[in-house]
Amino acid sequence: MDSRPIGVFDSGVGGLTVARAIIDQLPNESITYVGDTLNSPYGPKPISEVRRLALEVMDELVASGVKMLVIACNSASAAVLRDARERYTEGLGVPVIEVIQPAVRKAVGTSGNRKVGVIGTTATITSRAYEDAFAAAVDFEITSVACPKFVDFVEAGVTSGPELLAAAQEYLEPIKDAGVDTLVLGCTHYPLLQAALSYVMGDRVNLVSSADETAKDVFRVLTEHDLLAPEGSKPSFRFYATGDAAEFEVLAKRFLGPEVSGVRHLQRKVLDD
C-alpha cells in the first residue's frame, strides 16, 4: 500500500480527461497534475523539443515524490515514452503509463470492419506511433489525419459552434471516405470535442478515447507493484500550470469540476512545498 500521489501531466487541460477517469475508477488515489500551458500546444513542436519539455515536467513530478507517472498527452507519449521508462522506471523504480496503447487496445476490440481512423496533433501523427501500435493487429486499415486546430479550440474553451464544426468537417472528410467504423481520439484534448466529432462522423462510428483504458492500466500496474492507496483513504488533488494559473483553473473547472481549486503556478521545486 502506498498513499503517495500519482503524477499526471499534459501540455494543457486535455489530460484532465485522464485524471477524471482515474478519480472515477480509483477513488482512494491522490493526484498531482501539471499542465504545461506555457509551452502548449506540443503538437506543432519538433519531437526533440517535446521530449525535452516532457522530461523537465516529469523530473519535477518525480522530485515531488509521486509514485507513478501518467503521460496524459499523445504527443509526449509518442516522443518520450522510451526515454521516460529508462529514466524513471528502470532508473528510479517509478512506473510510467502512457495513452497510446490503451486507445489502440480499445479500438481493436471495438472495430467490426477493421477500418480505424486516428486523429491527433501533427507531432503524434508524424511520429506514426499509432501505426506502430496497430502493427500487431492483423489486417487493420488505419487512416490518420492531423487536426492541429482542435487543441487551440479546447484551450480557448470552445467545444461547439460553427467554426469548430467547419474544421471538423474538413479534417474528418478523408476518414469518412475511408469507411471507418471506429475513430481513435488520439489526443487527450479531443474527448472534450466529442459532441461535435460525433455529429460529423455520425452515430454508426464509435469514438474511442484512451482515458478510461489508461485508468485501467493505472489500476493494473499499481496493483502489480503493491502501490494502491489504502482503502478508505481521503485523496488530495493538487494542480499546477506553467502558464497563467488563474486562467487554467477557470478552464479546468469547466472540464473536471470542483476537484480543481487553488491551481498554482509551477516553479522549480514548488511541487514539494
Image: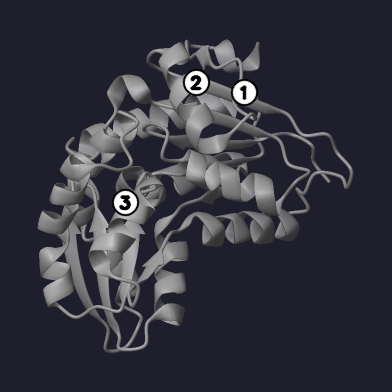
Q: Is residue 203 left or right of residue 250?
A: left
Task: Name the quadrant containing residue 171.
Answer: bottom left
The residue positioned 61% from the left and 20% from the top of the image is 261
Residue 88, above or below 34: below
Where is residue 149 shown, x and y percent of the image?
18, 41
The image quadrant where one finds the C terminus is top right
Residue 78: mark: 3
- Residue named by callout 2: 249
At mark 3, the secondary structure is helix
Where is residue 208 shown, x and y percent of the image?
41, 65
Marked residue nearer the N-terminal end (2 or 3): 3
- The amino acid sitting under disc 2 is Glu
Where is residue 222 shown, x and y percent of the image?
70, 53
Pick the residue in front: 114 or 74: 114
In front: mark 2 or mark 3? 2
Q: Quote the CA–CA distance across marks 1 and 3.
A: 24 Å
Pick the residue in front: 59 or 237: 237
- The amino acid sitting under disc 3 is Ala
